[in-house]
Amino acid sequence: MAQQQHEHTTTVVEQGRFCLARCTCGWRGPARRARSKARSDAEDHTSTA
Ligand SMILES: [Zn+2]
C-alpha cells in the first residue's frame, strides 16, 4: 500500500504536562510525557496508515 502522507499530516500538541500526536485524519496518539515519544507515535501512524 502506498503511503498517503497528504491525508496524514501529524502534529504534536501539548496537553497539560503531556504531549500527544494528532493527525488530520482524526487519529490521536496516546498521551506521552516525552515529546519525542509522541513524535514517534506520529511516525508510526503515518507509516502504517
Ligand atoms: Zn492519519
Image (cartoon, helix red, strand yellow):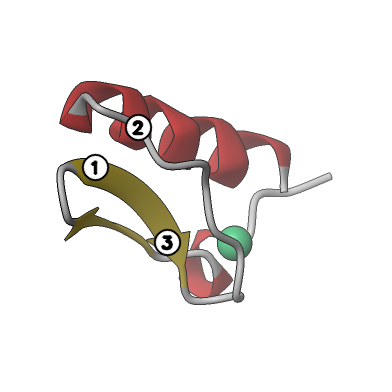
Comparing marks 3 and 2, which lies closer to the viewer?
2
* Quadrant containing ligand 1: bottom right
Comparing marks 1 and 3, which lies closer to the viewer?
1
The disc placed on residue 32 is: 2
How many angstroms separate mark 2 from mark 1 (CA)?
A: 5 Å
**Which residue is labeled 3 in the image?**
22
Asked if 9 appears above or below 45 in the picture, the reply is below
**Which residue is labeled 1 in the image?**
18
Of all residues, the one furthest to the front in this rendering is 16
How many angstroms separate mark 1 from mark 3 (CA)?
A: 13 Å
Q: Residue at x 35, y 48 (%)?
A: 20
Say what secondary structure mark 3 lies in.
strand
Q: Observer-nearest residue: 44 or 22?
A: 22
Query: Is disc 1 surrounded by few (<14), some (14 to 19) or many (20+) residues within 10 Å?
Result: some
Say what secondary structure mark 1 lies in.
strand
Query: Is disc 3 surrounded by few (<14), some (14 to 19) or many (20+) residues within 10 Å?
Result: many
Indicate the amino acid at tag 1: Phe
